[in-house]
Every structure is written in structure tokens, then in C-alpha cells.
Image (tube, rainbow, N blue to C red):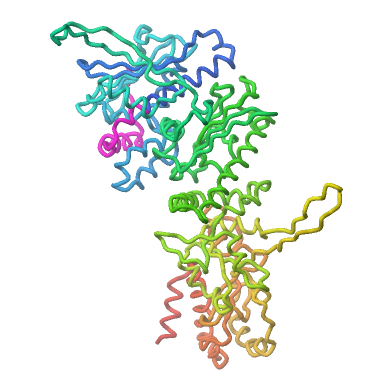
Amino acid sequence: MAQHQFQTEVSQLLHLIIHSLYSNREIFLRELVSNASDALDKLKYLTVAEEPYKKLSFDPRIDISFNKDEKTLTITDNGIGMNDKDLADSLGTIARSGTKAFLEKLSADAKKNSNLIGQFGVGFYSAFMVADKIEVISRKAAEDSTWKWSSDGQDGYDLESAGADTLKPLQGTSVILHLSEEGLEYANRWSIEDIIKRYSNHVAFPIYLSYDEKEYDDKGKEKGSTPKTEKINSGAALWQRPKSELKEEDYLEFYKSFGSGYGAGTDEPLFYIHTKAEGTLEYTTLFYIPKKAPFDLYHADYKPGVKLYVKRVYITDDDKELMPTWLRFVKGIIDSEDLPLNVSREILQQNKVLVNIRNASVKKLLQEFRSLADNALSGSDEVKEKWQTFVSQYNRPLKEGLYQDYGNREAITELVRFKSTAVESSAEKPGWTSLADYTSRMKPDQKYIYYITGGDEKTLRSSPLLEAYREKDLEVLIMDDEIDEIVIPSLHSYKKPGVSGASAEGKTEGKTEEPSWELRAVNRSGADEELGEKKDNTAEKDAKPVIEKIKKALGDRVKDVKLSRRLHDSPSCIVADENDPTMQMAQMLKAMGQADMPEIKPILEINGDHPIVAKLKDIDDEEKIADIAGILLDQALLVEGIRIKDPSDFVKRLNRLIS
């Protein structure tokens, strides 16, 4: 027998589960049944796809039994099974990266929410909520050795070879829970049956419960018992049943049954979409949109949420090609009638049938998203709240679709939302606007959609760059998401001229054109043209000596110094050259590891009418000019939320001027 220590993350997780997740202990059974179902899915696939497994006798099932006297509860499946390496890898470590960081971020309140188990995919460990000790006996399909894993959930686990007779199925896994005092309430027929019907009723394999049915005489005295085994779930693939037969609660129960295998995360979805396509391609899809975005939504190794079936035979649940990356928050099922059962997982992304199903599924999802958005305009408070939740959780991945999915860009553009100077917004209730709403509020002669990018909404709303736009009552979109720096340049414009269709006689009915508006960043050079103002040559001439002084003082800290026509109250601001990334973008790229990126120098714009700038005309002291110029640049950087290189130098300059 070999003794092993848990990884640090596992020990931390077990401590969290045992001491903090007691609010809903019963979900441990949902998680173990979900794991058993996955094991059966995997072996079912192998028995039809790979030669070594086709000869196996396989009648998939899950068995549950309990012994109240011995305080045990056992869940057994005859699925793929595990060998010693699988047991050590699966039960001794947590493969999902980011788990430790996720646990550290949990608030005290969040720790009491047992649904978190489903979020980060460690369902097996939830059994320690009800067990003092767990034994796992397993034999991998097509192998001869049986292995036993055991642990009390403290510091480590034991792993040893077990006798062949310790596991009744020819292959599979038996999880034996030695129940704690808190767990004894689940060692009875009624509790188990109730949990299975609520959480796992639609698992696609039969679940059998074995128990002793007590017998009584005429006087009500117990005279013995009879062993009984009965099927306690429907065992039907819910997604294949006609929608007319299904009720709302059926869909919600099925969603709950996803467990950690899908990473559903919450007990109820925001909404779901059930589609059955017949014709050239036959397939069924059932997609759920979670109320809360999965915790690993922005991890490179995120867990895909969609399972692929072929003729109700499970194929894979770890293929990121089943859905585009920007729709990685979608959970659910794709079941095809046209794919071959032995389709290689490696060539799935090149398979034309799957590509067509994926493309059609994306369009269907976009239609449903658009329908929800449209209904929210005049719908009930519940519908409006649903749309607000969707935007708050998934606006960012939708933006990713703008530059990842060119074919659907127009549809995605109508869905993405932005904050705006024309819409009130708060931390509790962000205000959102669409590009369509923005254009409906545009001035009659306005040619551009104006926006400002940066990392903080409050900073952007108070930016000096917006002063001239406020004066002219021009709306500016507040883009405070770092992804906006990448997305918007790829979008470039909104709405393009469209041409109407030809008549039945083949004659053109004529063009029905819709204006095309270019998106313009206010933190770029060229604001004179954007604001529609003509250059004042006299002002340019008067400011030239001051500009030359500032240029000389700042040297290579700036790309250029210009007279600004966008400033009214502030003395200075920074903008980016049309051909350069913004300072915020440069900072973001460096944070992402692009350390070799050349330094981006800003353009400093000065307000010729501001008293500080005006006084520079009469100052000849080069040291004082250098101090004022340095402060004009540094304060412009600070106002835009950009860290200055030398704060101590800024303070020294400021102190010299004050004294």
C-alpha cells in the first residue's frame, strides 16, 4: 500500500468543503452520479468506435445502495473505470488551473454557496461533506488490475492493488462513502430517491436503487425484509423528447443534472434554447445560458460547456471547436444524426457536417439574443431584468465576437452595449446603450460616432478630452473595458448602405441607403476635423512661442506638442497619434508580456487660453519652463489614469512652483 500526500490546492479545497459548504450537502449525490454518467458515456463511445473495446459486454447502469448499520452509501457504475495512474491523477490532484486563486477570492458569504462546487469542477470532493472516509475501487475497461483509493479527507490518501472480487462489474468504479453523523440522513430510500429525481432524473443511463423492503405481520410487527432493486430515474435523453411533452421544470431539472461535468454553476439558467433541425442535416441542440458567467470564462484553459453526441452516443465534452470561443459561456448538448459514430476527435473541426451545425447553432443563438434584446424594450420588468443580467455577464465575450467572427459581425454589433455620456450609470445599475440607440440621438449634421477608451469609467467621464464635446452637446461612448481598445478599431464603422432586392420581373427597385458612420476616438489626434472647427491661424501664431518652449523642455518625452481646440477648462491633455496605440493599449500589451514593445510617446495638447499656459509667454527661466511643462504632461497622464514614470520628480517640480 502506497501513501500519498494531497497537493496543497486539494487540502485547501477539502478544508473549504468540509467546513464551509454545508448549506446544501445533498448535491454530493448529484456530483457522484454525474461522474458515473460521464464514465458510462466514455465507455459507450469506445465500444462502438475502437476495436479493443467492441468485444466488451456492456449494459450501462448506475447502482446505488446503502447500509444503515455499517453507515455506508455506495455508488457503482460499469463505465470506463480507472487504473492506479488515473486514480492518482483524478483524485489526488486538481487538474484545473486557477483553482487556488479562485478559492482565495471567495468571500465568506460565497463560501456557503454549495453551487460553487459545480463551478470549478471538483464534484467528487463534495462527498467529504457527508463522509468521514471514502473508498474508491476501480478497474479500467480492458485491463485486469483492480485498484483501491482511500482517504479521510485530511492530509493524503492510500493507493493499493485490490482483489478482483472486490468489484462486481467487469469494469467500472465503486465509490463507498463511510458516512459521518451529518451524512446518515442520506442512508435511506426516500432521501436518495428524492435527490435523484430532482437532480439526476434525466441522466441518460438507468439508475437503480437497492434496499431492503421490510415486511410486517397483521399486528404491525416487523417479521423480516425482502431485498429489492428498482429503477429510480426516467433514463431518457431529454433533448430528444418533443418540446410539446416537456415542461419548464423538466428543462430546469436537466440543467441541475449537469453538475461539475458541465460546470453549470447555478441551479437555474438565465434561459434555454431547444432546437430540432430536420432536412439536409438532422440534429438536436439544447443550449443553456447560465445566470452567472463561469469563473474560468477568461482563462486560456476554460472548460467547454457543450457536449457532442452522435445518435445519442456521447463523443466528447472537451472540444473547444463545438462553439466559437466568444460563445464559450454557452452550456448544453449537440446531438447529430449524420456524423459517423467513430468520428475522430482530432478531425472534428474539419468535418463539414459539424461545421454546418455549429454555424447554424451560432445564428440561432444570435437570433435568441436579439429577440431578448428587442422584447426588453417594451416587455415586463422580468424580461428587462433578464436582458440586463445577460449584458452584465456576457457583453465582453460578445465584443470578442466582433473581431473573431467576421461572418456574424453585423448581428453581434446590434447586441453589444456601451456606457455613454448621455446615459446615467452607477456601480449598482450600469446604464447601457446600443450603437443603434446612439445613432438615433445624433445631431442632424453629425458624421461620426464618438468614443473614448480607458480603464476606468469615472476617470473617462471626467476626462478633459470630453470638454469640447460637452460644449457642443455631442454624445460620447464611454468604453472602459480593456478589450474595447482591440475591438473598436476592428469594427471601424456602423451601418452600411444596403441595396433592395430585384422585382419579380428582374427590375431593380432602387437603392435604399442607410448612412454609414465612422467610429472616432476622441483620444486621438485630429480632433479639429472631428469637431468641425476651422483652424484659427492667429491663435496658432500666438501659441507658437509657447509650444516651442514646451517642446524643448519635454524633449523626447512626447511625440509632439500642439495647440488644442478640444480643451475649455483644463490646461492640457494627451492624445495618441493616429498610427500609434493609445497609452492605455501600450500598458495593456506590456502587462500581457510584450516587454519588447517600443515606447509609445503621447502628443501633448495645450489650452492656449488657460492662465498657466498663457503665463509661459513671459517666462524665460528655462528651469521654471521645464517644471511647468513637466507638470502639464504629468497631470495630463494622471487625469487619463496613466501611471507617471517618476512620481518623485513630479512632486519636486510641484513643490518648487508652489514655493
The answer to whether 354 appears left or right of 265 in the picture is: right
Identify whether 376 is placed above or below 214: below
As rendered, which of 511 and 497 lies closer to the eye?
Answer: 511
The image quadrant where one finds the N terminus is: top left
Image x and y of residue 70, in percent: 21, 16
As rendered, which of 545 and 402 lies closer to the eye?
Answer: 402
Outermost residue toward the bottom?
Answer: 618
As rendered, which of 213 and 65 lies closer to the eye?
Answer: 213
The image quadrant where one finds the C terminus is: bottom left
The answer to whether 492 appears left or right of 567 in the picture is: right
Image x and y of residue 388, in percent: 47, 53
Magenta residues, start to end:
1-30
Identify whether 421 is placed above or below 106: below
- Whether residue 644 is in magenta: the answer is no
Q: Quadrant of residue 274?
A: top right
Image x and y of residue 176, in percent: 31, 19
As rendered, which of 324 and 231 lies closer to the eye?
Answer: 231
- Whether residue 23 is in magenta: the answer is yes
Q: Quadrant of residue 430?
A: bottom left
Mark yes or no: residue 259 visible. Answer: no
Identify whether 101 is placed above or below 491: above
Image x and y of residue 24, in percent: 29, 35
- Please tell me which residue is depicted at 62% across the width and 81% down the height of the picture: 563
Mark yes or no: residue 352 visible. Answer: yes
Q: How many marks?
A: 0
- Please tell me which residue is depicted at 16% across the width and 9% down the height of the picture: 222
Give the main secondary structure, helix, strand or loop, of the magenta stretch. helix
